[in-house]
Image (cartoon, coloured by chain):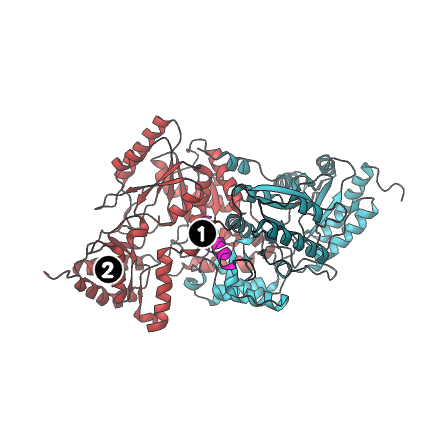
Chain colours: A red, B cyan
Amino acid sequence: MINKKMYELGAKRSEIRELFEYGLRRKAEIGAENVFDFSLGNPSVPAPDSVTEGLQKLVSEVSPETLHAYTSAAGDVTVRAAIADYINKNEGTDYGAESLYMTMGAAAALTASLTALVGEGEEVIVLAPYFPEYKVFIERTGAIVREVPSDNLTFQPDIDAIKATLNEKTAAIIINSPNNPTGTVITEESVIALAEALKDAEDRYSKPIYIIADEPYRELVYGGVKVPFLPKYYRDTVVCYSYSKSLSLPGERIGYVLVPPTVSDSGSVYLAIAGAGRALGFVCAPSMLQRLIPFCLGDTSDISVYDRNRRLLLEELTSYGFTLVKPDGAFYLFMKTPCPSAKEFAEVAKKFELLLVPSDSFGCGGYVRISYCVTTEQIERALPAFKRLAEEYGLGRGK
Amino acid sequence: MINKKMYELGAKRSEIRELFEYGLRRKAEIGAENVFDFSLGNPSVPAPDSVTEGLQKLVSEVSPETLHAYTSAAGDVTVRAAIADYINKNEGTDYGAESLYMTMGAAAALTASLTALVGEGEEVIVLAPYFPEYKVFIERTGAIVREVPSDNLTFQPDIDAIKATLNEKTAAIIINSPNNPTGTVITEESVIALAEALKDAEDRYSKPIYIIADEPYRELVYGGVKVPFLPKYYRDTVVCYSYSKSLSLPGERIGYVLVPPTVSDSGSVYLAIAGAGRALGFVCAPSMLQRLIPFCLGDTSDISVYDRNRRLLLEELTSYGFTLVKPDGAFYLFMKTPCPSAKEFAEVAKKFELLLVPSDSFGCGGYVRISYCVTTEQIERALPAFKRLAEEYGLGRGK
């Protein structure tokens, strides 16, 4: 019998994907240059040269039977050692290859970690607004999603609300900083308070409660902001990382789970994640992509483009009368809608050919997400449409 | 809390992997040339030139922001259309891109199909001897594995035993032809009888019972043998394919699920598989690898090497007094052990530096699997060791 839940997940695409597909149809109708698609987090800035040069070198210099061979299930050990060294250099840690498990991007890192660490009927806390696939990943394990709204001015975690939600069934909390969809970086102050709350709960319920840190946007920060490295503040942290955004490789699926040796019973946690990867059918992360990573450690795509887009949009949209929280990272702006229904606002925006994602699917109302990982030129062409959208709602009249 | 089952899967590597790791240690001790490793199905024949040339072309001619971009979750539509055309040309079918869902190899194809089509407490039939990970994949869905031994002379399916096992809880049967570990290709006669038995059961229980065909070895056949294309014989067949073996790309993880339009309610089956892929964290199959496939359709690695290895081993081992079934496909020989315990025999073989996988983990006793996807030179050097192993058991004395 067809699994109903899986059928529904396949039949009902995410709202983000729906909007993207609408955009494709609309572009075919009126020309790509006339549709302002801010729906997807698909980086527009090309991968750094080290990616293309590294791939060329691998393909021309490594024999195919080595380049394309199975690696160990956890990943090639020299690749893992190189990544560990890179983390150590940046964070002053002392990790080895044995703390890293290579995955097909952050999504696979999350499903392996959740499958390993969360049991049926247990609870996983997510901080709204959050990436909608978390719900899909958590519910597939049989666990229960507990949404905790973030502070709606700063989008920092609401520590009191988290404390009130922690209970003996809490298995983990997913932390995503820089955040999709708000671009917020959780401050060190918030991290310290969060770590304290979690430690208290661990003591109270005599069991580990894991932070599962989803960090594909770690390097995408602006204005010198630092992203606190969570394992330093809270021992039971596993980090799910992806090179999708930092190296503009979203389709290639390469990332890792980091299980620091400080995690309670870290050896068993690591093995359970490896076991989960095996049961989910991962076998090993794509071998050529694994071998590419040492060529690119420390590189990113040219994120000055995203920074320019961010500043341009922030300044202009604010001047039109919209309300936005200044994001420190990722490539998303979260804009307050001038009417209560984000869905209605996003529909109205479509009349101006602006594709904005209503916030409802992120677990909160009253906002739209604007993905600014597009060309600056697209933003410049879209500004008059944003202005007319503001006028439609009577914004900015007093100015 | 750590998931116990996942921990065990991570902590207890497959016996095949254990033996492979033993081989690595032993090679370090006595020199790689003195260890005869027949443990892994890691192709030794390099990928065909079209793989290397295709990759070079993609990396140098396609812009990185296109090459590495997300594809649709089901896979790039032009790639899927090209694969459908290739299947149509070979099998006289009329499939379109919408019947194909690109995956990270056959393992991911299997876990997505099982998650979509098999419910908790339902039963999945596997025909022993079988690839041990089937058990891991099936049990992760909460379903029950029902092993049905194959005919132990020919390794063809035992249709009567399958009939006796089919019941109202049967959701699917996994068919793997050419087979790992025996190399057997299921004959057309067996396929027809199997299809009849399954159709009867579908009618009796008024529900679909799926064949999940695991076909990574489809192109690896010798002596002009034809592998029957199962969807032609039984409508409720989904095919899980991988390019790992045919193109010698085991580490790269690229394959697909084919859901023919003849499958009952095929649109819903397809969507459930897509939903399962989403819930398991697959996002999309590696984009560059997807785009490589149209360069290589119809190509294989030079399988004449495997055929030479197969004939050499078969002839020599038979002449030493061992008993083997002549395999028509894949790159495995299944050799009867001259003592009841396959494990004991494999341990004795180690004394001669021969690494052979005991059959117990494939769900049957009394055999070892010999992976002959190695160099012919390794086989030639190993023959004296096989001869001494035969002598150890007093074989071939009469000759």
- Furthest residue to the left? A398
- Residue at (41% x, 43% y) in the render: A138
Q: Which mark is residue A386?
A: none
Q: Is residue A247 left or right of residue A309?
A: right
Residue B12 x %, y %:
57, 36
The magenta segment is B266-285
Residue A177 x %, y %:
32, 46
The main secondary structure of the magenta stretch is helix
Q: Which mark is residue B278?
A: 1
Residue B236 x %, y %:
58, 56
- The answer to whether any part of residue A18 appears in the image is yes
Q: Nearer the viewer, residue B99 or B51?
A: B99
**Label 2 packing within 10 angstroms: few (<14), some (14-19), many (20+):** many
Disc 2 is attached to a residue of which chain? A
- The answer to whether any part of residue A56 appears in the image is no
The residue at which mark 2 appears reads as A313
> Image quadrant of residue A91?
top left
